[in-house]
Amino acid sequence: MMEKYKSIIPDFEAFQQECQKEPISTVRRNDIKAGEDFEEKLAEDFEFEKASWNDKVYRLKDEKKPGKSMLHWRGEYYVQEESASVPVTILDPRPGDKVLDMCAAPGGKTTQIADRIDNKGLVVANEVSDQRMKSLHANIYRTGAFSVNALNEDGRMIPEDREFDRVLVDAPCSGEGNNCRREEEEMASKQESKDLANLQIDLLEKAFALTKEGGTVVYSTCTFSPYENEYVVSQALENNGVELERIELDFEHERGLENYEELDFGEELSKTVRIYPHHLQSGGMYVAKFRC
């Protein structure tokens, strides 16, 4: 399982063992809707513990389905893998910011941004898929994220007539971080990852064009492929006059790769981070943070 990445995952045995397990169910508290008695109400439905690095993330200890709870339907929490809440934490949106979520559906990160800015500011949630817009609208409504304007557009075609303080590019990817339990032959090929990288580079370059000088762009994927991660970021650095900011996290993780096979990314890529399933008992994630 994932033998092709054995050379880049330091504790490969722990990685493999975690890939054979079901990830822990986690929910993220939505303070737009949740009150001071949220944990008391959550305890009526679930045994839980808080994530050590984020007091809004709760790990559920039983097998009940969190999507069936009234707390979910009332928008008091969002069912979201723990690792999926990392990119917005790194983006660090503030009240009053103008923020673009370039690839937004189904809305987990969009609603997290709205919560972080306390609905004070503007969040543009863009989604290219007509079908996925339905889930995006539903989650915006359920969570009370009225600071969000939804946009149905190819991210590469968004007009450059406004400047954002922060942009999140949670890019379409091969999804290996969420699908590491699949057989090797079912995973994306190297060529498929390279093809995706072209789209990812285009989206990232558009994000830079939409971000004001001194603003922040966060690029994230839920895959392990260096072609979709470090290669994309290295190309962005080479061609766009932006800088990487070093990411620091309060939980176990790995630094971004400086090289892979025939590719030399350089020391700068160690400022990015890789999160493997065994780090948080969650999905895999890659995150880079740029200053424009």
Image (cartoon, helix red, strand yellow):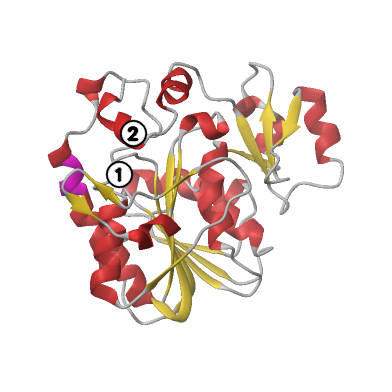
> Looking at the image, is 240 positioned above or below residue 31?
below
Magenta includes 88? no
Q: In the displayed structure, does residue 117 sit left or right of residue 156?
A: right
Is residue 132 in view?
yes
Three-letter residue code for mark 2: Glu
Residue 75 in the figure: left or right of residue 244: right
Crowding around mark 2 (Cα neighbors within 10 Å: few <14, some 14 to 19, many 20+) is: many
Residue farthest to the left, as pictured: 191
The kind of secondary structure the magenta stretch mainly shows is: helix
C-alpha distance separating marks 1 and 2: 8 Å
Q: Name which quarter of the figure residue 43 lies in.
A: top right
266, 59: nearer the viewer: 266
Find out whether residue 194 is within the magenta segment.
yes
Query: Where residue 60 sits in the image (x, y, percent)?
Result: 68, 26
Contact check, label 1 and label 2, Cβ < 8 Å: yes
Q: Is residue 154 visible?
A: no
Read off the residue under disc 2. Answer: 176
Q: Can you tell which mark lies on residue 173?
A: 1
Q: Return the mark for residue 82.
A: none
Q: Residue at x 56, y 46 (%)?
A: 85
Answer with left or right where residue 200 lies relative to residue 278.
Answer: left
Element type where label 2 sits in the image = loop
User: Closer to the camera, 25 or 7?
Assistant: 7
Q: Which residue is at a point 27% across and 57% down the rendered structure image?
A: 265
The region drawn magenta spans 192-196
- Name which residue type carries label 1: Cys
Q: Secondary structure at mark 1?
A: loop
Q: Is residue 248 above or below residue 243?
A: above
Q: Residue at x 25, y 70 (%)?
A: 238
Percent across and percent down for residue 210 are: 37, 75
* Residue pictured at 41% horizontal, 55% vertical: 270
- The quadrant of the picture occupied by the N terminus is top left
